[in-house]
Image: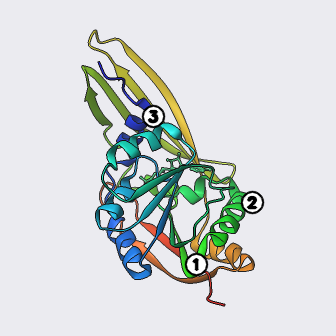
Amino acid sequence: MPTVNVAALWHDLECGGYREDLPAWRALAAATGGPVLDVGAGTGRVTLDLAAEGFDVVALDRDAALLAALEHRARGLAVETVHADAHEFELARRFSLILVPMQTLQLLDGRAGREAFLRCASAHLHPGGIVAAALADAMDCFDDEHSVPPPPEVRDVAEVRYSSQLLAVVEECGRAALCRRREITDSTRRRDAEDVVLHLDRVSAEQVAAEALPLGLVGEDPRYVPETEQYLGSTIVILRKPRQ
Ligand SMILES: C[S@@+](CC[C@H](N)C(=O)[O-])C[C@H]1O[C@@H](n2cnc3c(N)ncnc32)[C@H](O)[C@@H]1O
């Protein structure tokens, strides 16, 4: 029986279904022409979409299991993977576009972490190139219209059911804590449950642009990904490295 890449499976369940931002990344790639660096690429939701559109994409992530799934899915496409930390990476190439989809910038441990990434990103941009990062405030997940948790995302693999449900989003020390329950139920109905918490910094596009300016990246008009019944909307902050 083939082994299951469980990290990739949870990632796909929790992130893989989101498609609302793809037109924005395609438009940015078309405007800059690539090559593209996808930071926090995961199993390749955005990388594979852009590569299928013909862009040359490098996918960077610190999780080797996710990159293994991405590589498997990328066969035949112009995709390279890099196992590295977004705070400190050094690649022997430069990019026209550096993408940070799905609030990954908010996973980088506050202002110091964002600045470390932006410094690194700036060093990897061609003059005139841009960093584009999607931001959202996860505290908006629940409101008067969405006061109960959404149904779990579920997948069955080899008679085992994997289920992940967002239960709550709470404020913890200025960050949004997303509380999920992951359950694995085997064919004998034995169930394993694990509660996982993901912390997202709460930061606006204006704050990120202000942090980026001293690092030589100039903020431009942000773009917006509209909210849907299922997903929060997001703001894509755009930071350009000026041509000297
Ligand atoms: C919310 S997921 C987004 C995945 C993918 N970009 C997408 O939009 O579907 C965040 C990703 O960022 C990666 N990540 C988190 N912190 C990172 C870091 N410091 N360096 C590199 N990757 C990181 C995680 O492993 C995960 O794959």
Label whose residue precedes the other's in the sequence (3 or 1): 3
The residue identified by callout 2 is 112
Q: Which mark is residue 7?
A: 3
List the single residue furthest toward the bottom. 244
- Position of residue 69 relative to residue 130, above or below, is above
Please name the amino acid that badge 1 sits on.
His
* Colouring: rainbow
The residue located at (48%, 71%) in the rendering is 236
- Residue at position x 48%, y 25% in the image: 194
User: Would residue 168 be found to the left or right of residue 85 on screen?
Assistant: left
| Quadrant including the N terminus | top left
Q: Residue at x 47, y 67 (%)?
A: 36
Query: Which residue is identified by label 1?
Result: 126
Instruction: Evaluate whether residue 39 shows in this view.
Output: yes
Asked if residue 167 can be seen in this view, the reply is no
Q: Earlier in the sequence, mark 2 or mark 3?
A: 3
Q: Residue at x 34, y 54 (%)?
A: 18
Q: Between marks 1 and 2, how big is the CA–CA gap?
A: 24 Å
SS class, disc 3: helix
Q: Is residue 75 left or right of residue 118?
A: left
> Could you say whether the residue bearing mark 1 is in a helix, strand or loop?
strand
Q: Are marks 2 and 3 in contact (CB under 8 Å)?
A: no
Near-viewer residue (46 or 1): 1
Residue 122, how many percent across, how many down?
65, 72
Q: Quadrant of the C terminus?
A: bottom right
Q: Amino acid at mark 3?
A: Ala
Q: Residues within 10 Å of mark 3 (few under 14, many from 20)?
A: some
